[in-house]
Image (spheres, rainbow, N blue to C red):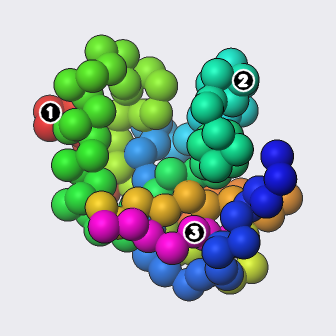
Amino acid sequence: IPSCPPANCLNINIEAYRFVFNPICNASFIPQGKTKPQRIVNATSDTLRCSLLGLSMFTDETKAIDKYKQLKKSFKNLGKTIGTHLAKGKIEPLDGLGTPPDKQSHFDFFEKSGIDLSRKFEITQDLGGV
């Protein structure tokens, strides 16, 4: 995919939130485009295809929970797909590249090869009841 990660990506130093499985494992840090390659095939643009190869993260805990609630309304088995818990972790420049966060605090993170993000995140909340 041309320009993936996007040119606007930066090495970032930030606290981030991500939807994860409990217990946290490597499966919590596999991009949707890799767990479901058909989504990349069906994507309508290179921008979307690239986004599917990044890890969705958030800079704001409340906005992350709001996004989970929104997704849960549309996807019955959301917990089996992206996880049932919210985790918080520290992303550092050596971990990879991130897109600038949008108004909902969402950003795509492209981790460097060999980085184990599962060690850097801890569960903060069970999203089962939201």
Q: Is residue 51 left or right of residue 86?
A: right
Amino acid identity at mark 2: Val
Amino acid identity at mark 1: Gly
Residue nearest the observer in this picture, 37 or 90? 37
Residue at left offset 68%, top offset 19%: 38
Amino acid identity at mark 3: Thr
Give, as a single range, the part of the protein colored magenta.
Answer: 97-103
- Badge 3 element: loop
Q: Is residue 116 left or right of residue 100?
A: right
**The disc label shown at residue 99, or none:** 3
**The disc label shown at residue 129, or none:** 1
Residue 12 visible, this angle: yes
What residue is pinned by disc 2? 41
Residue at left offset 48%, top offset 25%: 81
State yes or no: discs 1 and 2 in contact (Cβ < 8 Å).
no
The prevailing secondary structure element of the residues shown in magenta is: loop
Q: Position of residue 12 (x, y in %)?
A: 59, 81
Q: Disc 3 or disc 1, which is closer to the eye?
A: 3
Quarter of the figure with residue 71: top left
Q: Is residue 104 above or below residue 70?
A: below
Near mark 2 (Cα within 10 A), the count class, few <14, some 14-19 or many ≥20, is few
Residue at left offset 57%, top offset 68%: 99
Q: Is residue 90 magenta?
A: no
Q: Disc 3 or disc 2, which is closer to the eye?
A: 2
How far apart marks 3 and 1 lie (CA) works out to 30 Å
Residue lying farthest to the top in this orientation: 76
Q: Is residue 24 above or below residue 109?
A: above
Q: Is residue 59 left or right of residue 21?
A: left
- Badge 2 element: helix
